Amino acid sequence: MGLTLSQKIIKNHLLEGEMVAGNEIGLRIDQTLTQDATGTMAYLEFEAMGVPRVKTERSVAYIDHNTLQAGFENADDHRFIQSIAKKYGVYFSRPGNGICHQVHLERFGKPGKTLIGSDSHTPTGGGIGMLAFGAGGVDVAVAMGGGTYYITMPKMVKVNLTGKLSDWVSAKDVILEVLRIMSVKGGVGKIIEYAGEGVKTLTVPERATITNMGAELGATTSIFPSDEITKAFLKAQGREQDWIELSADTDAQYDECIDIDLSALRPAAAMPHSPDNVKAVEDIGQIKVDQVCIGSCTNSSYLDLMKVAKILKGKTVAENVSLSISPGSKQVYNMMAKNGALADIINAGGRILECACGPCIGMGFSPNSSGISLRTFNRNFEGRSGTADGQVYLVSPETAAASALTGVLTDPRTLGDSIKIDMPESFEINDNLIIEPASVEEAANVEVLRGPNIKEFPLADALPANIAAKATLKVGDNITTDHIMPAGAKILPYRSNIPYMSQFCFGVCDKTFPERAKAEGASIIIGGSNYGQGSSREHAALVPLYLGVKAVVVKSFARIHRANLVNAGILPLTFVNEDDYEKISQGDALCIPDIRELVKSSDEAVIKNETTGEDIKVKLELSQRQRDILLAGGLLNYTRETAK
Ligand code: MIC
Ligand code: SF4
């Protein structure tokens, strides 16, 4: 039987387990990336492991998320990451060089290789045929140390693309269509492979937009074949030697198949507050817009921004709209500065921000009260923009630019003749903002520079015999990590200060939670389905751990967050019968007897609701490795124990 594209890469990197969907497998990781908001923690964890130098083929530390420097915290964290990267063999991409996923695609990614990154949009690398996963910081730390990365062997989904995108319809509209079909939890436990004749009509940046937003499907990752188009892209990046051809076997077996006719797609938008709340722009109608933000790792490539510049050229942004543009990388920024496209954007009234995540992670450009913001980004979760009642719509760069000019949500097809931007034959290559690590000899003399913002991070205790705790919080479906541990300009500078961050835990849902949880000492959280969707931030596990959370009981989990809970030493439990969610109310006193024994080998446990007298069955869906990690009190304790 033939193999799918990702099965081929998995087979080449398989260290443990069998390639059977649902089994835990261990993979060898070739490359890692970190960004600053998760990086401080990842490098502290790496340091705690005591490995003298990274063992990967290439590890890169990017500074792109928190570049505002509103206080010393930020600058201290950057300095810490720069110095520790130098010492331990990690390449350092300076602030100003661009967003990790865009730069990694341009300068480091290689077809057929494995990559994990402490950021959920690492699957962007799938645009050039890499098998790239988002992961928690501690998983990245382990991989940097040469350790195995574990995932559940996913099911295979084929998205068969036919036809060709019509004028003014864009890669963003393709992934919004996939989201409309599959929903934000439809990709959990699956790899999405793009195939079919339509693939040949898509450039690498377009493919990368699509694999990037596979994160919003909850997918383990997404991938395109590596073909002549990939080769041309790598050649234009001066990296033709990194190209290999890769595709699925013709007789590969898929668990699911989705057909999309590219020719039939229309410009689309994901409406508030979920990336799968998708409708055609023309069906939503001409709602008035307050703000337009163009950029993010999804849509900030040269191709995207050149289209925007062409639409804006010689025009003026509508007076009710504030337009921000964040180029994805220095390469993009520079090329547009040189060819005059940047001037067209500036003249039209676009407000140019640095090449970083910026408004995507709430670092400025929060919309006005109940303001409507059109964004080319990938997430429109409630509150993420920094304005609690902000209404964020996710759209293509074409729709964003057209709407910025008219001041209302505008179908770009109304702009008339289409615009055509050719992929450059060669990109401008200058890696002067990437600092190489110290040599093995020099490394001993490199001092790691720490500021007072770096506080100790919490470690769980070994799992106790029984857990007795109140359900201090009950939440609904699709809770994101932005609900659990918000980001944004006020909180992001404190990513290495868990005690400080804890004041904001679950702030979007219930501002009283941190105080109540602390007062109780021990807590259990109750949630609905797809709990923990969104980012890879392990802070969404470490902060609850700090506040005394012992277990999270839900209908279902998102992949990365579930792994982060196990790594932190918090029990992830799922209801055997989803209706039992109703049998626990916030404030109920719960007890999980014999949990230590059950975690050792059982697949089920019983929660005793002491307030109502009811018993509730929950599943322990754990591999033996995860059981051992939980018994030890988290991955770091486990690693220390097994190293003894
Ligand atoms: C995001 O888009 O939510 C982030 C910010 O990039 C996160 C990482 C983080 O929280 O630092 C992600 O996607 O993993
Ligand atoms: Fe940065 Fe936004 Fe991409 Fe996250 S989704 S990496 S915040 S640009």
Image (tube, rainbow, N blue to C red):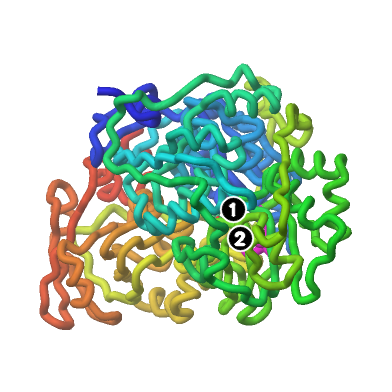
Residue 3 lies, in percent from the top left, at: 32, 26
Question: Label 1 is placed on what type of residue?
Answer: Ala
Residue behind mark 1: 37
Q: For the residue with label 1, is its CB less than 8 Å from the closest atom of ligand 1?
A: yes
- Asked whether 361 falls inside the magenta stretch, the response is yes
Above or below, 285 relative to 179: below
Q: Residue 111 or 491: which is nearer the viewer?
A: 111
Judged left or right of residue 530, residue 266 is: right
Q: Which residues are magenta?
A: 357-363
- Where in the image, quadrant-wise, is ligand 1 located? bottom right
Q: Residues within 10 Å of mark 2 (few under 14, many from 20)?
A: many
Judged left or right of residue 553, residue 280 is: right
Q: For the residue with label 2, is its CB less than 8 Å from the closest atom of ligand 2?
A: yes
> In terms of secondary structure, where does tag 2 sit?
helix
Q: Is residue 336 visible?
A: yes
Q: Residue 100 or 175: which is nearer the viewer?
A: 175
Q: Is residue 485 visible?
A: no
Q: Residue 549 or 581: which is nearer the viewer?
A: 581
Name the residue at the top extreme: 241
> In terms of secondary structure, where does tag 1 sit?
helix
The residues tagged by marks 1 and 2 sit, at their Cα atoms, a distance apart of 10 Å
Residue behind mark 2: 361
